[in-house]
Image (spheres, rainbow, N blue to C red):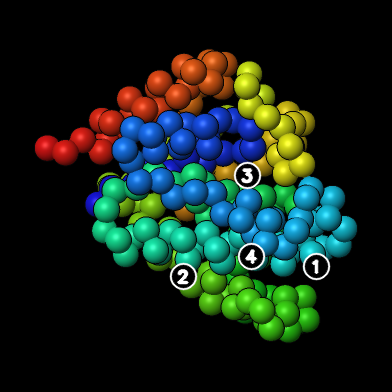
Amino acid sequence: MRATYLSGTGATGKTTIAQTLFLLGYSVMDEVVRDIANTHKIKNLGQIRSSELKTLNFQRMIFQDQINTEFEHLERGIDFIGDRCIIDNMAYTGYLLPFDTHQIYRVAKRPGEAQNTIMPSKDFPDWESLYNRAVQLLAFYRSPDVQIILMSPKPEDGTEIDGFRVDNFRTNNEIFSNMCDLFTSLDIRFSIIDPSITIQEKTAKVVEIVKRFHRKD
C-alpha cells in the first residue's frame, strides 16, 4: 500500500487536485476541517479565535479526526491520496497558539498544565494519547511507501477564498515555514511544487507524480 499526501496552506490547490485524482479513480482521504465546522456550525475563523481555549479545542478536534481518518484508510490496505496530514494541523496549531509547536503534543511533559484545566477531556481524548497515536503515523510518513507533496502559498486563479482560508501571503508563508520545519525536524521527506505555475499546470504535474508513484508493476 502506498500513500500520497497533499500538504500545505490554504488556497494552494490541494483539494482541487485531490478531486481531480478522485475522478481519475484514486481513493481520496478528504480534508476533515469542513465536516467539523459544519457539525459545530462554525462559519469562519473568528468564531474559533475568540479565545485560546476555543482555538485549542478546535485544533484538537481536527487533530483527533485527522488521526482517526488516516488510520481508517491505513486499515483498508489500499493506496490513497490524502488531502492534508497531521503535520498541517501541528503547523497551524503552532501559529494560532502561543505554544511551541512540538511541545503542544507532549502535554504530560509540561508541569502545571493538566489536561483537565487547559485541555478538558470530557469530549476528547487527552493530548498525550493523541500524540502517542500520531507517533505511529509519523513513522508511516517516513516509510518509502509514502510521499508528501507540499504546496507553497500563493493565491491561485480559480481558487475561492472563504472564511476558513487565509489569503494573506505573509501569514500563509509563516505557516508554510512551520510545516517545512516540522517535516525537516521529524526526518520526513517532502517535495515542493513550484508556486509560480498555474493551478492547471500544478494539477497536471501532481497527477504525473502520483501516477508514477502509484504505478502497479
Q: Is residue 174 left or right of residue 126?
A: right
Q: Nearer the viewer, residue 17 or 59?
A: 17
Q: CA distance from mark 1 to mark 2?
A: 23 Å
Which residue is at 69% across, 35% downward?
172
Q: Which residue is mark 2?
A: 133
Q: Residue at x 43, y 59 (%)?
A: 70
Q: Secondary structure at mark 2?
A: helix
Residue 150 x %, y %: 50, 36
Q: Is residue 141 above or below residue 151?
A: below
Upstream in the sequence, badge 1 or badge 4?
1
* Residue annotated with mark 3: 178
Q: Mark 1: which secondary structure? A: helix
Q: Nearer the viewer, mark 2 or mark 3?
A: 2
Mark 1 vs mark 3, CA separation in Å = 21 Å
Q: Which residue is mark 1?
A: 53
Callout 4 crowding tier (Cα within 10 Å): few <14, some 14–19, many ≥20: some
Q: Nearer the viewer, mark 1 or mark 3?
A: 1
Q: Earlier in the sequence, mark 1 or mark 2?
A: 1
Crowd rating for badge 1 (residues with CA inside 10 Å; few <14, some 14–19, many 20+): some
Provide residue 165's location: percent of width, then percent of height: 71, 39
Residue at numbered disc 4: 61
Q: Residues within 10 Å of mark 2 (few under 14, many from 20)?
A: some
Identify which amino acid the numbered label 3 is placed on.
Asn
Label 3 element class: helix
Compared across the picture, whether 187 is left or right of 88 comes to left
Q: Distance of mark 3 from mark 4, alpha carbons?
A: 20 Å
